[in-house]
Image: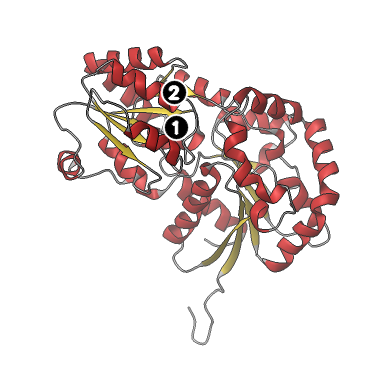
Amino acid sequence: MSEGSQPDPRRRVLFLFSDTGGGHRSATEALVEALELEFPGRFDTTMVDFFREYYPSPLKFAPELYPPISRVPKAWGLSWRASDGRGRSKAVSTLAYPYVRRATNRLLRENPADLIVSVHPLVNSTIMRAMRRAPRPYVTVVTDLVSTHAFWFDRRADLVVVATEEARRKAIEYGIAEGNLRVIGLPVSDAFNNPIPDRAQWRTDHGWANDRPVILMVSGGDGMGPVRRVVKAINEARLPASLVVICGRNEELRTDLSRVAWNIPVHLYGFTKEMPAFMSAADMLVTKAGPGSISEGFICGLPMVIYARLDGQEDGNVQYAVDQKAGVWAPRPREVVETLRTWIEDPQARAAAAQASSNAARPLAARQIARVIADQMGVR
C-alpha cells in the first residue's frame, strides 16, 4: 500500500434466507463463515429472514408453518410440482408481487448492500423486480442438491451457484445462461472438515461405547419424519451397535423416546451445534433426504441409510446418494434395519460405502463460493 493510501472499504453483503427448514440458515452461516476465513475483515455481512422480518401476514409465519406442512409429504409434493415450471412459477410470482411489494422495498431500503446473496428460492423474483430501478449485483446459491424448483432460477441474477451437474442442467432448462452458472457444491460449515483427532477418547468422554459401531440418526433441525417407527425398529432388532438420535427442536419426540425400554445403548439429544463432532465420531448415518445432512455425511465419509424424503423436492437427493453408492433408500423401518445389519456384519461393505461417500464430498464448496461472491465485487 502506497504512503497516504487508504485500505479498501469493507464490502457489504446481504444474505436472504428463511428458517423454513434448517438448511437455509446453516448454508447461509457457512457462507458468512467462509467469507471471513477467506477474506478476514474485508466484508460486513447481514443475514435477513425475509419471511419473518419483513413479509406481511400470513407469510411472516412461514417458518412456524413449515414443520407441520412438511409432515404431510404427499401434499407437499403436490404443491411443489404444481408450482414448478417456468410459466407456473412466473405466474405465482407475478400474483404474489403486489402483496409483498412494500415489504421487499422496505427490506432493500433498510439493508443497503454492495451485493445480495439469495439462499432461498421464494425471494428471487420479487427482489429482482423490486430492484429494477436500482439494480445491484445478485448471486443465487441453490441449496437443493438435485431436484431444484423453478423458483430458484431468475435470469436477471448475475450468477447462480448449484451443487451438482443435475442441478446445472435444470438451471439451463429454466433459462439460466451457461455463462452465469457455476457448479461448486453445497456450502456447509468448515467444522465438518476438521475430524476429531481421537475418536475413541471423544466417545469415552461422551459416554458412547467403543466396543461396537455407532449409528447416528438425524431428522433435520425440526425432528421431522417417521423417526419413532425407525428408532423402535432398530431397538427391537437388538443390533450390536450404539444408537445416537438427534431429535432437533422436537421435544415431544425426545420425551417419547426417553420412555422406550431400550435393548441397545442409546443417547438422545435435542437441537445441537455439535453435529460435526457427532458425524466424525459415528460409523453410519440414518437420515432423511435433506441436502445439508447428505452433504455433511459425504464430507464425514459416512455410509448412509435414507429413510424419508420430501416428495418432489428431495426425490433427486435420494437417487443421487444411491447412484454414488454412498447410500441406500430404505423407506420402511425393516429395510433400515436390514441395511444396518448388513453393514455391521460386513465391515468391508460398510467401508466401501464410506469410501464412496467420501468420494462424493465437496468439502471446499463454502470457501469456493465465498471466492466467487468476492470476485463479483472485485475483491481478490
Q: Residue at x 56, y 40 (%)?
A: 143
| Residue 72 image point, x, y percent | 61, 27
Name which residue type carries label 2.
Ile
Residue 324: percent from left, percent from top: 44, 22
Q: Which residue is mark 2?
A: 306
Q: Disc count in the image?
A: 2
Element assignment for label 1: helix
- Looking at the image, what colour scheme do you see? secondary structure
Question: Does residue 265 appear anywhere in the picture?
Answer: yes
Residue under the point 47% across and 25% down: 226
Closer to the camera, 255 or 378? 255
Residue 110: x, y in percent? 70, 68
* The quarter of the displayed image where residue 360 is located: top left
> CB under 8 Å between callouts 1 and 2?
yes
Type of amino acid under label 1? Ile
Q: Closer to us: mark 1 or mark 2?
A: 2
Local secondary structure at mark 2: strand
State left or right for residue 368 relative to residue 124: left
Residue 265: image x %, image y %? 22, 29
Q: Can residue 346 be seen in the rendering of this structure? A: no
Q: Which mark is residue 294?
A: 1
Name which of mark 1 and mark 2 comes first in the sequence: 1
> Which residue occupies 47% across, 43% down?
365
- Looking at the image, residue 28 lies above or below residue 290: below
Question: Image quadrant of residue 376?
Answer: bottom right
Q: Is residue 267 left or right of residue 93?
A: left
How busy is the neighbourhood of tag 1: few (under 14 within 10 Å), some, or many (20 plus)? many
Residue at 63% in and 41% down: 65
